[in-house]
Amino acid sequence: MLFTDRADAGRRLAEALRHLEGEDPVVLGLPRGGVPVAFQVARALHAPLDVIVVRKLGVPSQRELAFGAIGEGGVRVISDDIVRRGRLDASDLASVEHAEAAELARQAERFRAGRQRLPLEGRTAIVVDDGVATGSTAAAACEVVRAQGAARVVLAVPVAPPDAAERLRAALDEFVCLSTPFGFSAVGEWYRDFSQTPDDEVVSLLSRAADGPGAADGPRTGGDVAEEVAIETSGVRLTGDLTVPAGAGAVVMFAHGSGSSRHSPRNRLVATALQEAGLGTLLFDLLTPAEEGNRAKVFDIETLAGRLAGATGRLRDRTGLPIGYFGASTGAAAALRAAADPGADVGAVVSRGGRPDLAGTGLPGVRAPTLLIVGGDDTMVIDLNRAAQAALRCENRLEIVPGATHLFEEPGALQEVSELARDWFLRHLVKGA
């Protein structure tokens, strides 16, 4: 079984957990990659979502061998057998625990952003991760959850090797796993998109889920429209997620890069920031599922730009609002090429880690104010963006995010991208902003 990304895995996993909906469960995601999966599970089960922060305690001379684990609330789970076999004394235990406790507190504060941990006493707790390899971290998390007072502990993952699944199934109240392939070597091989989950995404998802009942059902917009839409253009049917807050002054269309989709966690994080600023968003796929694996289609900028332009007309007819483009990687080239069309009526363009050079001779024709955002450590793409900036004849700016790489996975990097994009769109798209 192959998953598109963590959101897709979470939706499928939720269906296998429907029988727990009546138990009023609490869903707990393991950071970082388990939280996007857990968000979808909590959304489907109408359950509260929290993060389960656990630190394994490694034997000083053999760090990969854990003699226990600690969790929030002073919970300690210690294996007396490993302590005895490792000949660990009290000072050894205290030294390791002190260091891990400091990191546990830092992570919990970062992820929860000041919110209190959800109480688990007497509850059914569903611990969720994006997959397990050995299962040791997930097992430690389940022990900590039990020690925090959960009456029933369920571990749910999309994929695991058969031997780990067998061990976990025997040790837990319930173990739910969608796939246990015999050819297992790593969790990531069972995902098309297994890019790193940044801290900012974890914080955003937990914040959305904490807003109250139903908050996990979609982006925090408080708005009129939040639905999946189908757009017919250039002879194909494209699927997207349209969100328009009440009173929105404009809509931003997202054009994803190669190997990505409308479920991209990075672009969804940016979209949430735009929605919170009162902007509508449309995240949609420029390629059909059958085309996604075709490299020639992925880099056919003319075709992608044509589809984007066609979808723009359909969206304008539907909303009547000014429209901007947010493009990433090859999607940025498609956005710029579409904006260069003589008939284009696009109010602003933002490129994140883009390949504007692939827009070729179309660059001088772009009339919409254009912001190019590049990571400071993405040196090759910086050079490509500087060359593209020189070819642009519209109002433009190049912003370099210090210390960021191509995917902006570093702490705070995507937040800075979101703020830059938000300010650019508000300035150029929304009258009187």
Image (cartoon, grey):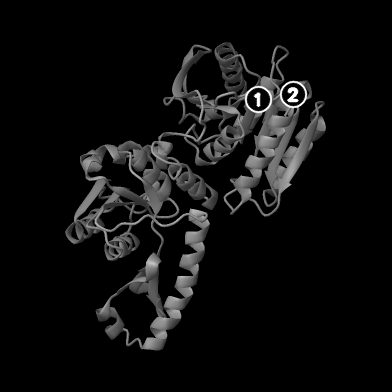
Residue lying at 42% horizontally and 76% vertically, measured from the top left: 97
Q: Is residue 309 above or below residue 31?
A: above
| Lateral position of residue 304 relative to residue 383, left or right | left
Quarter holding residue 340: top right
**44 or 211, nearer to the observer:** 211
Earlier-in-chain disc, 1 versus 2: 1
Residue bearing the label numbered 2: 368
Label drawn at residue 387: none
Give the amino acid at mark 2: Ala
Residue lying at 39% horizontally and 82% vertically, measured from the top left: 93
Residue sitting farthest toward the left: 170
For the C terminus, which image quadrant?
top right
Q: Position of residue 269 (x, y in %)?
A: 54, 40
Q: Tell me whether the residue at label 1 lies in contact with that at label 2, contact meaning CB atoms closer than 8 angstroms.
A: yes
Residue lying at 40% horizontally and 34% vertically, measured from the top left: 217
Helix, strand or loop at disc 2? loop
Label drawn at residue 324: 1
| Lateral position of residue 256 relative to residue 420, left or right | left
Regarding residue 179, the answer to whether it shows in the image is no
Q: Position of residue 221 (x, y in %)?
A: 52, 32
Helix, strand or loop at disc 1? strand
For the N terminus, which image quadrant?
top left
